[in-house]
Image (tube, rainbow, N blue to C red):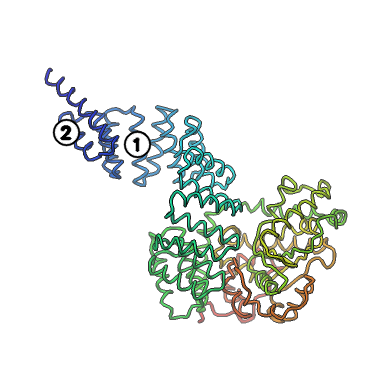
């Protein structure tokens, strides 16, 4: 009995020593002492628990898990062991088991902020975002200055597109921990999402002050500079990031895309090819290459991409990018059926990962003719902000809007602002939300909306007589655009419905456009667009909106270019015929095509796919789907 007492006394003293070593970061020494204790007392719970903690801190998660299980076998109601067991299970990829372990820990101790935080992290990794939010909020209610929980809470709010709340969370965190470079980086990214690019750059600058070699921040700062049109500075930031980390795939890809958008196609190709040598499994470099070259049948990249596509271990996002890349390459060489198969698989995956309420979207489009009726439009006409500056180029993605934009961009008196969301973003400040009816809109509100838009666009542009806005989100807003800016020019560009839809289906968009990844949804979306455009034609005053048919533009280019400039009140400029030489950035999926001289190969794009696009044809209906060609191309011709 006396000997047992001495052993226990010795173990207690040894345990204090082991804990002191653990706290000092002397993990190896702590483990040696724990092992010695357990050689004398194999069931010493505190020694087993501390040994498991040492192993966890050393990233030996399997050993740690085994020892947390030993603790729980001896004492099932040990919340700390259950919580740490959950962390170990999560690190081993057993997320469902980890979640159960956290639930069990919280059943024993509901007000356990660390368990709530780690449970939230597990739910976040499982993409159960709403549940993760609840756990972080419970943890922060118990421990408001819990820095790690604040950071993760901001991240999940960003994942839910609750950007303003995320920004407030990160801002609270940096007041608590002003040296938290990652939080300043996330502040910057969130400000970018809110289109507050100058503030984003300031936040990135704070992060680089703390960590000058923070590659992600340099890359993100370059992206923000790109959005502000400071392209050379953006390239400098991408190069700085690559000088710190030549293996930064993100910085290299962003540099390649900006080179492509600036028309530096050879440089972009070099960047993407170097990226492939460094990262042969990163599909976005293949995708980048497909955007800046046309493939030949013997191009070795085609079998390389197809080999990679057969790798079942490939990440889902990489699989999506690769599907679009292989599809483009095979389309270039006339392998239409195989091309379509790859794109269909990639689109199905992409669509499954995007939120889209088709019913709500179509209901909104149906409501607009009621809000902007002919009578209401006539009563409110001419009362807005009468600036002649804006030119709105309206149309669906891949309909030819970029071509029209580049024609105008070559004119000496025109600045191209690209695809901007300024008009949509100005609606809420003017009305508090989208207007429910014209009778509730005052003349002052319309003037303020127009003035707000023009002020914001002028901030993006050098002095110019006209500024073009090519947002593909503006076509549902045409009625409101005209009322707020009665002197604005509107150009509606449209293309064969099936060609338009199929060209979008073949495109992996940087963001948005969820309906384009499903042929039937896209067909129904096009029908809603066509119906609404017919309404706008009927209610707009004559001469406000110019109709430009893409096929006519390609067939009789100079005549159509004259029409476009005359509609904008601009004198003729021969430079507009050389649209492919327009300077500046082209931030669109058409960045490569619009740098080429005029070509007509996109007319009748859908003909080789006739047997494959029936869901689209059915959704469009006979009034929109053109008659099939008499002689369809073979689906396997080269």
Q: How far across and how far down the image is residue 347, in percent?
A: 53, 62
The reply to whether dot 2 and dot 1 touch (C-beta < 8 Å) is: no
Asked whether the viewer can see residue 287, the reply is: yes
* Nearer the observer, 149 or 161: 149
* Nearer the observer, 349 or 423: 423
**How many callouts does the rendering have?**
2
Residue 36 is labelled as 2
**Badge 1: few (under 14), some or many (20 or more) residues near its Cα, within 10 Å?**
many
- In the rendered image, the quadrant that contains the N terminus is top left
Q: Earlier in the sequence, mark 2 or mark 1?
A: 2
- CA–CA distance in space, label 2 to label 1: 23 Å
Q: How far across and how far down the image is residue 274, in percent?
A: 41, 70
Q: Is residue 424 left or right of residue 76?
A: right
Residue 278 is labelled as none
Q: Name the residue tied to disc 1.
A: 84
**Badge 2: few (under 14), some or many (20 or more) residues near its Cα, within 10 Å?**
some
Q: How far across and how far down the image is residue 294, in percent?
A: 51, 77
Figure check: 446 above or below 534: above
Give residue 278's quadrant in the image.
bottom left
* Nearer the observer, 199 or 278: 199
Mark closer to the observer (2, 1): 2
- Element under disc 2: helix
Q: How far across and how far down the image is residue 186, in percent?
A: 51, 48
Q: What residue appears at the point 58 percent right and 51 percent down from the top-left corner?
A: 199
Give residue 300's quadrant in the image.
bottom left
Figure check: 462 above or below 480: below
Asked whether the viewer can see residue 495, the reply is: no
* Nearer the observer, 146 or 92: 146
Q: What residue appears at the point 63 percent right and 71 percent down from the top-left corner?
A: 499
Figure check: 50 above or below 5: below
- Element under disc 1: helix
């Amino acid at each position: 009995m006396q000997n047992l007492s001495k052993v226990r006394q010795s173990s207690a003293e040894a345990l204090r020593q082991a804990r002191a070593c653990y706290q000092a970061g002397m993990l190896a020494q702590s483990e040696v002492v724990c092992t010695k204790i357990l050689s004398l007392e194999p069931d010493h719970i505190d020694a087993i628990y501390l040994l498991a903690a040492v192993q966890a801190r050393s990233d030996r998660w399997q050993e740690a898990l085994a020892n947390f299980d030993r603790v729980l076998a001896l004492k099932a109601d040990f919340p700390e062991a259950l919580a740490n067991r959950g962390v170990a299970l999560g690190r081993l990829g057993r997320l469902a088991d980890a979640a159960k372990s956290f639930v069990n820990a919280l059943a024993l101790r509901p007000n356990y902020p660390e368990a709530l935080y780690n449970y939230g992290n597990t739910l976040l990794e499982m993409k159960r975002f709403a549940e993760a939010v609840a756990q972080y909020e419970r943890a922060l209610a118990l421990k408001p200055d819990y820095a790690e929980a604040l950071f993760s809470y901001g991240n999940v709010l960003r994942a839910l597109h609750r950007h303003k709340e995320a920004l407030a969370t990160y801002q609270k965190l940096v007041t608590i921990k002003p040296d938290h470079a990652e939080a300043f980086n996330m502040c910057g990214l969130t400000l970018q999402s809110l289109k507050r690019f100058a503030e984003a750059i300031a936040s990135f600058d704070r992060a680089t002050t703390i960590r000058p070699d923070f590659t992600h921040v340099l890359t993100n700062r370059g992206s923000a500079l790109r959005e502000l049109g400071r392209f050379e500075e953006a390239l400098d930031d991408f190069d700085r990031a690559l000088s710190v980390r030549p293996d930064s795939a993100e910085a290299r890809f962003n540099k390649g895309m900006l080179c492509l958008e600036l028309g530096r196609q050879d440089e972009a190709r070099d960047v993407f090819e170097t990226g492939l040598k460094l990262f042969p499994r990163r599909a976005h470099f293949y995708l980048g290459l497909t955007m800046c070259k046309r493939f030949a049948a013997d191009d070795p990249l085609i079998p390389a991409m197809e080999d990679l596509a057969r790798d079942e271990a490939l990440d889902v996002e990489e699989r999506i990018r690769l599907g679009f890349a292989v599809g483009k390459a095979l389309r270039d060489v006339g392998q239409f059926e195989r091309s379509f198969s790859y794109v269909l698989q990639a689109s199905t995956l992409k669509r499954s990962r995007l939120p889209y309420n088709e019913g709500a979207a179509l209901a909104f489009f149906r409501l607009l003719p009621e809000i902007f009726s002919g009578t209401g439009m006539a009563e409110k006409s001419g009362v807005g902000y009468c600036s002649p500056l804006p030119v709105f180029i309206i149309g669906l993605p891949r309909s030819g809007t970029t071509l029209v934009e580049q024609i105008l961009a070559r004119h000496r008196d025109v600045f191209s602002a690209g695809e901007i969301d300024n008009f949509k973003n100005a609606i809420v400040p003017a009305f508090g939300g989208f207007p429910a009816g014209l009778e509730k809109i005052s003349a002052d509100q319309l003037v303020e909306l127009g003035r707000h838009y023009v002020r914001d666009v002028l901030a993006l542009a050098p002095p110019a007589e006209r500024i073009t806005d090519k947002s593909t989100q503006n076509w549902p807003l045409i009625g409101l655009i005209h009322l707020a800016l009665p002197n604005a020019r509107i150009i509606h560009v449209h293309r064969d419905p099936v060609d338009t839809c199929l060209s979008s289906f073949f495109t992996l968009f940087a963001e948005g456009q969820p309906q384009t990844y499903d042929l039937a949804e896209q067909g129904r979306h096009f029908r809603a667009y066509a119906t609404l455009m017919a309404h706008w034609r009927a209610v707009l005053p004559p001469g406000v909106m110019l109709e430009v048919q893409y096929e006519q533009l390609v067939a009789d280019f100079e005549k159509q270019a004259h029409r476009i400039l005359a509609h904008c009140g601009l004198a003729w400029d021969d430079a507009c015929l050389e649209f492919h030489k327009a300077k500046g950035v082209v931030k669109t999926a058409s960045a490569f095509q619009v740098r080429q001289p005029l070509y007509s190969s996109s007319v009748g794009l859908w003909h080789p796919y006739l047997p494959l696009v029936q869901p689209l044809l059915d959704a469009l209906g006979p009034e929109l789907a053109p008659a099939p060609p008499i002689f369809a191309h073979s689906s396997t011709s080269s």
